Image: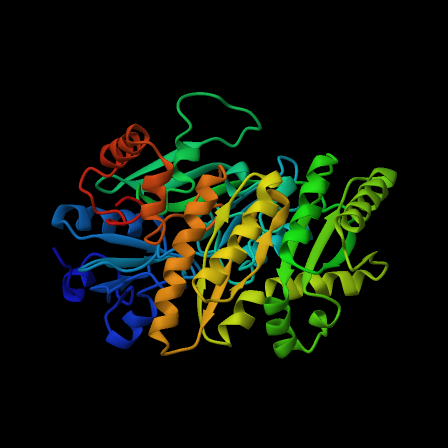
């Protein structure tokens, strides 16, 4: 069934329902260029949990699909509108409700921007580590929905590692609190962990309790340039073999560097074809030893140039440039991106496979990766209007998924399954495991309204 704006106007207070077609179009999809979508029947912008519950109750009673949306920065189509749905935007639920320095936790609404939370935490001498590249724009709710990672996750873990508890609207509009605020707790099933990464298919999250750390440690930055991605991959494997866990280890190839240079004139591509950026944050002399090991690994693998940065501003600028890669590539054409993860020792093999796939399908695949934990983001930029190149790109990226699985990896390290990874998920999981997933979905979403058509084929 499809909702009408007039019907929904009676469910929520005045001004919460949007129906203008031009406005609806701006809420219809995320940043996944190759994922299908349609215009929603309406967009709802609730301001509290009670309003979300009223909306879900009405939609469940009338069989209307509900699609949750954060900032729309997702890259798998997980927030894309489906036929007749109500898109629920959490942009108005954007408050940091509590910071507790003693317990080292924070309670936030789902619309809080990742970077804003980091700034608020820093004011209290605290740190929230998950830092996806979209952190200046993405929301905590969206991060929780996809179990987002980021540059720091190689050492500090992904979003799920920081979610202590949450409030959600489930079923036919029931409000539940899951998890805890204590440092430890093993009572019952881990329903909080189940909701994290569920991509809005099990309910709508309206409040999140997050674990925090103390102040961010001092970091040492090591930079290395390499002649090709495979050589850089060997450096990544060497660092892992040495037992060093950097706080960040990022790979950026020439195509990405040139795109950033075109936007910021930083001269990044002048020094080599592939850049590795590493940070080490162990305290005292141990951090210096880690940085020395990383530098030695770069050189032993075949770096054409490498150094430990002595200029903190310059080091910070390099990592800022890393975050600018995706928007810089978007200026060049239509961006088709992938998100696979392989065992760290398989990174060189995976990078070589990607180079072969690019040659076979006559596309250029840009190299971008959270290399320290084997999370690769190969990117294809297609000229607008070039349907043949777009088709080849789609096939190439499906081949990337298959190669990652063949190397013992997974179809998504942090972007989620959404629409784009459904085939890959079906290939990764056994039929029995998929049946368990569907059984959980059916048990918690009894009316089938939460983000239907996503995750599973």
Position of residue 192 relative to residue 248, above or below, is above
Camera-side residue: 292 or 169? 292
Could you tell me which residue is drawn at 65 percent across and 66 percent down? 321
As drawn, the residue found furthest toward the top would be 187
Q: Is residue 384 left or right of residue 171?
A: right
x then y, percent, for residue 26: 34, 71
Q: Quadrant location of the N terminus?
A: bottom left
Q: Is residue 74 left or right of residue 210?
A: left
Q: How is the image coloured?
A: rainbow
Could you tell me which residue is drawn at 82 percent across and 58 percent down? 309
The answer to which quarter of the image holds residue 227 is bottom right
Camera-side residue: 450 or 373? 373
Q: Quadrant location of the C terminus?
A: top left
Position of residue 124 relative to residue 430, above or below, is below
Camera-side residue: 68 or 91? 68
Could you tell me which residue is drawn at 75 percent across and 68 percent down? 271
Could you tell me which residue is drawn at 62 percent across and 63 percent down? 253
The answer to which quarter of the image holds residue 262 is bottom right
Position of residue 133 relative to residue 166, above or below, is below
Q: Is residue 23 in view from this perspective?
A: yes
x then y, percent, for residue 172: 21, 41
Q: Is residue 374 in view from this perspective?
A: no
x then y, percent, for residue 40: 23, 64
Label total for image: 0
Q: Is residue 190 left or right of residue 99?
A: left
x then y, percent, for residue 440: 28, 32
């Amino acid at each position: 069934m499809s909702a009408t704006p007039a019907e929904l106007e009676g469910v929520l207070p005045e001004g919460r329902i949007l129906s203008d077609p031009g406005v609806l179009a701006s809420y219809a999809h995320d940043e996944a260029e190759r994922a299908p979508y349609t215009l929603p029947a309406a967009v709802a912008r609730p301001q509290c949990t009670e309003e979300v519950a009223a909306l879900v109750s009405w939609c469940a009673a009338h069989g209307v699909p509900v699609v949750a949306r954060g900032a729309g920065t997702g890259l798998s189509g997980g927030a894309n509108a489906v036929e007749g749905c109500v898109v629920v935007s959490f942009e108005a639920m954007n408050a940091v409700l509590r910071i507790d320095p003693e317990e080292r936790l924070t309670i936030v609404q789902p619309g809080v921007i990742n970077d804003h939370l980091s700034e608020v935490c820093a004011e209290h001498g605290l740190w929230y580590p998950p830092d996806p590249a979209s952190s200046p724009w993405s929301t905590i709710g969206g991060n929780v929905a996809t179990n987002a990672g980021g540059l720091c996750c190689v050492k500090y873990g992904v979003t799920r590692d920081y979610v202590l508890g949450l409030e959600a609207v489930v079923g036919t509009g029931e409000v539940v609190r899951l998890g805890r605020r204590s440092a430890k707790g093993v009572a019952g099933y881990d329903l909080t962990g189940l909701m994290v990464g569920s991509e809005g298919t099990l309910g709508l999250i309206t409040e999140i309790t997050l674990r925090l750390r103390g102040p961010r440690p001092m970091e040492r930055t090591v930079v290395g340039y390499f002649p090709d991605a495979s050589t850089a991959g060997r450096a990544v494997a060497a660092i892992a073999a040495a037992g060093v866990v950097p706080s960040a280890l990022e790979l950026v190839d020439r195509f990405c560097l040139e795109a950033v240079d075109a936007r910021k004139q930083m001269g990044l591509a002048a020094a080599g074809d592939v850049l590795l950026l590493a940070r080490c944050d162990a305290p005292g002399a141990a951090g210096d030893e880690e940085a020395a090991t990383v530098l030695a690994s770069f050189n032993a693998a075949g770096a054409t140039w490498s150094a430990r940065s002595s200029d903190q501003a310059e080091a910070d600028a390099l990592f800022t440039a890393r975050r600018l890669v995706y928007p810089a590539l978007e200026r060049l054409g239509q961006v088709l991106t992938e998100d696979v993860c392989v065992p760290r020792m398989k990174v060189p093999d995976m990078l070589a496979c990607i180079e072969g796939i690019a040659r076979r399908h006559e596309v250029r695949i840009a190299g971008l990766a959270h290399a320290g934990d084997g999370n690769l983001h190969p990117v294809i930029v297609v000229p607008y209007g070039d349907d043949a190149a777009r088709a080849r790109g789609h096939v190439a990226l499906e081949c990337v998924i298959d190669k990652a699985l063949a190397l013992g990896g997974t179809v998504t390290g942090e972007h989620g399954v959404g629409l784009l990874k459904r085939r890959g998920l079906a290939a990764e999981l056994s039929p029995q495991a998929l049946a368990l997933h569907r059984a959980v979905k059916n048990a918690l979403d009894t009316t089938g309204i939460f983000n239907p058509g996503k995750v599973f084929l």
